[in-house]
Amino acid sequence: MRGGFVAFVSLAGAVAVLSAQQPSQSPPAQPPAQPPSSQQQPSQPPSQDKPQQPPPVFRTGTNQVRVDVTVTDRKGEPVRDLGKDDFEVREDGVPQAIDTIKLIEANGAAPDDDMSLPIRSRQHAYAEAARDDIRVFVIFWDEYHIGEMAPAIRARAALTDFVQAAFGPTDLVALMDQLTPSDTIEFTRDRRDLAEKVHKLRGRQGVYIPPRSAVEEAQMYRSRDIEMLRAQVTASALEATIGFLGSIKEGRKAILFVSQTIGRLGYSTMDTSNWLDSTIRSANANNVTVYSFDPRGLDVNIRPSDVLHALADQTGGRQFSNNYPAIALREVVKNASAFYLLGYASQKNPADGKFHKIAVHVKRPNVDVKSRTGYYAPSSVEMEAAKKKAAENTAPPEISKALSKLVDSPHIEVAGDLWAGAAPGPDGKPKVTVVWTARDGSSDDRVSIRASADDGHVYFDGPLRGNRTTFDAAPGILHVRRNIVEADGSVSDRQDSTVEVPDFAGTPLAITSPAVFRASTPLQLRAIQAEPDPTPFAGRQFERTDRLIIRFAVAGAASADATVTATLLSRTGVALATLPLKPTATKGYEIDMPVGSIARGEYVISIEASRGADQAKTLVSFRVGSSQQ
């Protein structure tokens, strides 16, 4: 008995780890969702470690609520021509006036017919998932409740077709089971890799040996309750996955839950009903649609699970249970391709922390409507916590400052970009290079540069011959003014910028201004690699067919054995990837990055050097693709 009790405690701890992806706080008492049976709801949930239900996102005020609604016709095709007057929304039975309506369409196609972008890291996947035009799907394989033979074979065949044919190039898809912690879920766009993983899936209903993990070893000590414990592990993992998806993306997400039934979560069916009620509300609060797939198919002797039916129906999804599931499963992706985003101001202006039911009706006949069934209104305490979290997710000031330099200048008559950077000369004193890159690739003798210090001392004042000049300067802030001078001597356009010139001789560790080079063709790349001192590219706008070369050096007494790194960051400062560095012939460093390896958007490269207490850092911001994103 003592050994069994210790094992059970270990299992409970493992289950808690799977579910503890959100703060462990029981949600307030809520009106129950439709239960799978006529059993009354229990007073306590089957687990003490229930994740806290997050509040909904309020757009333009404390009472602004938004609802995602999928409307399909008799053929299952999305209806795309509805207006505000075609919808009727009720909250807790009270009609609401719809303020805004927007049709959201996302078909998973790559912009401008680009190839899909490979996911390089978990952070990169999260950054992609947060985009409005990216669809996110999770396939949850409940191996504890899938038969080892025919059901598993049918499910693998259907999922293989599903992952290979249903998704678009930019869709993010993850495959997991109940022993996959939510913080290790891996999203991918590699359909072949997904198909290979699907082929390895196994059904283990009633199969206990060999155990897969410490969790299952603990289950063996409680053989009398092993099925109940397996059900609890599955239920906790599913609820944690819902919360995890809500944390990485505000918009709609979908889970395809492959299972025959969840099973008995406690000693009473009331425990299962209570869990179902909580999970449905968590899915609605996190804008997650759950689709359930019973791989047993149609059989007069098989009754589909009421729990799985309620889970799908009340989160805006559907339960699939037929003999030809491969085609039916494509509805999961089709429903995510077009939906309406409705916004209304709740007449109650709730801040009570309670669950409020939402019912959406479409006045047009012969259509099917799916939407979440309600939301949690945040309490005043939760709203303050949300504000604090939003502040934490704001880009650091240095990232915002770096991105602020990505300013388009369509008003410039002769469009071009200006760059100024500093590096130590042979005597260790700073030398500043100024480059003007015309956007049509030409040279413009009308460009004139004036560079001066804060005290008014002028270091350079004259035309920029060949679009480039280099001159001596002193450490400190350097003011650079670019003029376009017409034939009559008048200035037709002016641009001001500042450059911080480091004290290379007096600082233990300093990084030279990174020089950026753009190669649009193999010939340009060979020219950059062959020239000892090529002209840098002043622009910071790149296409995905470009190759980005960045060169810099580390100066100062501590530079000889300093640790140097380069990291690609998102526009909010999230680390996406560590960039490889290779040494140059001039004892510097080079970053060679094909721009096609990253998505459209704005990025920052953080270059850092350190040796003990000596630290140096510089940022390079750039934009990929159209600036009108």
Image: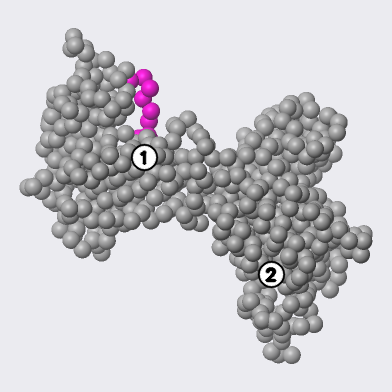
- Residue at which label 1 appears: 546
Q: How is the image coloured?
A: one colour
| Relative image position of residue 148 (x, y in whole percent) | 75, 71
- Residue at which label 2 appears: 202
Q: Residues within 10 Å of mark 1 (few under 14, many from 20)?
A: some
| Relative image position of residue 73 (x, y in whole percent) | 80, 35
In the image, is residue 223 above or below residue 451?
below
Amino acid type of the residue tagged 2 in the rendering: Arg
Quarter of the figure with residue 26: bottom right
Judge left or right: residue 283 versus residue 117: right
Q: Residues within 10 Å of mark 2 (few under 14, many from 20)?
A: many
The residue at the point 68 percent across, 54 percent down is 161
Quarter of the figure with residue 42: bottom right
Disc 2 to disc 1, C-alpha distance: 44 Å
| SS for callout 2 | loop
| SS for callout 1 | loop
Q: Is residue 592 visible?
A: yes
In the image, is residue 381 above or below residue 148?
above
The residue at the point 68 percent across, 75 percent down is 12
In the image, is residue 9 above or below residue 546?
below
Amino acid type of the residue tagged 1 in the rendering: Asp
The residue at the point 74 percent across, 74 percent down is 229
568 falls in the magenta region: no
Chief SS of the magenta region: loop
Magenta stretch, residue numbers: 403-412
**Which quarter of the rendered picture does the N terminus lie within?**
bottom right
| Relative image position of residue 386 (x, y in whole percent) | 59, 48
Q: Is residue 354 visible?
A: no
